[in-house]
Amino acid sequence: MEIIELFKYLLSQKSVTPDDGGLLDFIEKYLKDFKVIRIDKEGVKNLFIYKKFGKGEHLCFAGHVDVVPAGDGWKFDAFTPTEEDGFIYARGTQDMKSGVAAFLQAVKETKEFNGTLSLLLTSDEEGEAEFGTKIVLEYLKEHKLLPDFSIVAEPTCEEVFGDAIKVGRRGSINGYLTIKGKQGHAAYPQKAINPVHLIAPRLSKLAGVDLDDGDEFFAPSKLVITDIRGGMEVTNVTPDNLKIMFNVRNNTKTNQEKIKSYIADVLDGLDYELKLTQGSYPFITDTDTKVVKVIDEAIKKVTSITPKHSTAGGTSDARFMAPFGIKVIEFGVKNDTIHSVNERTTKEEVIKLYEVFKEVIKKW
């Protein structure tokens, strides 16, 4: 297959999380001279496939074959890739079957490489990801197969193809705060303890506050309130408690302990409960590492653009790799229609992404 034919084939397989649409079996056969490790658990399918070309370092291309549900309102069938005006429309065009097609074809055509080349693919990145990339990495660590470097082919570009790579990601901390009071009659406020009145003069020290100053790669870690509720939806009873939910997309300067300490200072003297949970942790890959330098050079050669090094956006499976000591970055097509109706990318971007990955392998 050539790259666009391969891309369209991947798009035509309905692989809504956690279904892989048969794609991992296809990829296993497509790279028939590679060694295969399959780790399937709780309905999630995972593939690690590798080949040792030489004695050098281990480079892994990683990503996911699953997509979010299509939803309604598409101009074409969401799982029938359709070309119009240079675009290809289908669910997963940007997120992230373009990336999978590009590195799959680039790896398939590789005849020489100074080290080990591998692919790590899961069918559960868009879901809970509990039995996806994370358990594969645990297996690879146990069997001494962890890669040294990884490129996750998530869509990263902003305005034009080649303008941005991700060298890190923020973490995500969820907060559940309860301010305790004493229910009472609105006509006798002196007999009650109104948690709304307690928090009101202090709310400005919570809502939208920056918990640090950020740095050259990360914006400040901001406390973003997402929900406030209390009371019985009546006008004559004051609430017993007030519940506040918030999220902090944290950089490497802020962690759960810092948030607990900050809230303790703001709410000093109040009766409250705080619960924090964390689904992902921040990481940064040094821009002087080999994988960053090589992909920068490859992008410049293919596009004549020097990409910026970004940490913006949500999360990806790269968050699982960094704690294992893997130097990981992300690079893929433009990100402007992911998860939306009429998701699309251009043929030109897919071809250029494939060329960038070919160049990375060549330069390695």
Image (cartoon, rainbow, N blue to C red):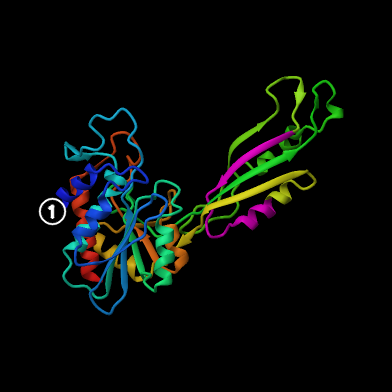
> For residue 257, which quarter of the picture?
bottom right
Tell me if residue 285 can be seen.
Answer: no
Q: Amino acid at mark 1?
A: Glu
> For residue 182, which quarter of the picture?
top right
Which residue is rendered at x = 13% and y = 53% of the image? 2
Question: Where 185 falls versus 124 (above or below)?
Answer: above
* Location of the N terminus (image quadrant): bottom left
Q: Nearer the viewer, residue 117 or 292?
A: 117
Q: Is residue 339 magenta?
A: no
Q: Nearer the viewer, residue 6 or 189?
A: 6
Which residue is rendered at x = 23% and y = 56% of the image? 27
Tell me if residue 232 can be seen.
Answer: yes
- Residue 64: percent from the left, percent from the top? 33, 52
* Residue closest to the far bottom: 55
Question: Where 330 falls versus 141 (above or below)?
Answer: above
Residue range of the region highlighted in magenta in the rendering: 241-262
Residue labelled with disc 1: 2
- Residue 253: percent from the left, percent from the top? 56, 59
Would you call the spot at circle 1 few (<14 residues within 10 Å), some (14-19), or many (20 or more)? few
- Residue 183: percent from the left, percent from the top? 79, 29
Left or right of residue 343, residue 40 in this image: right
* Location of the C terminus (image quadrant): bottom left
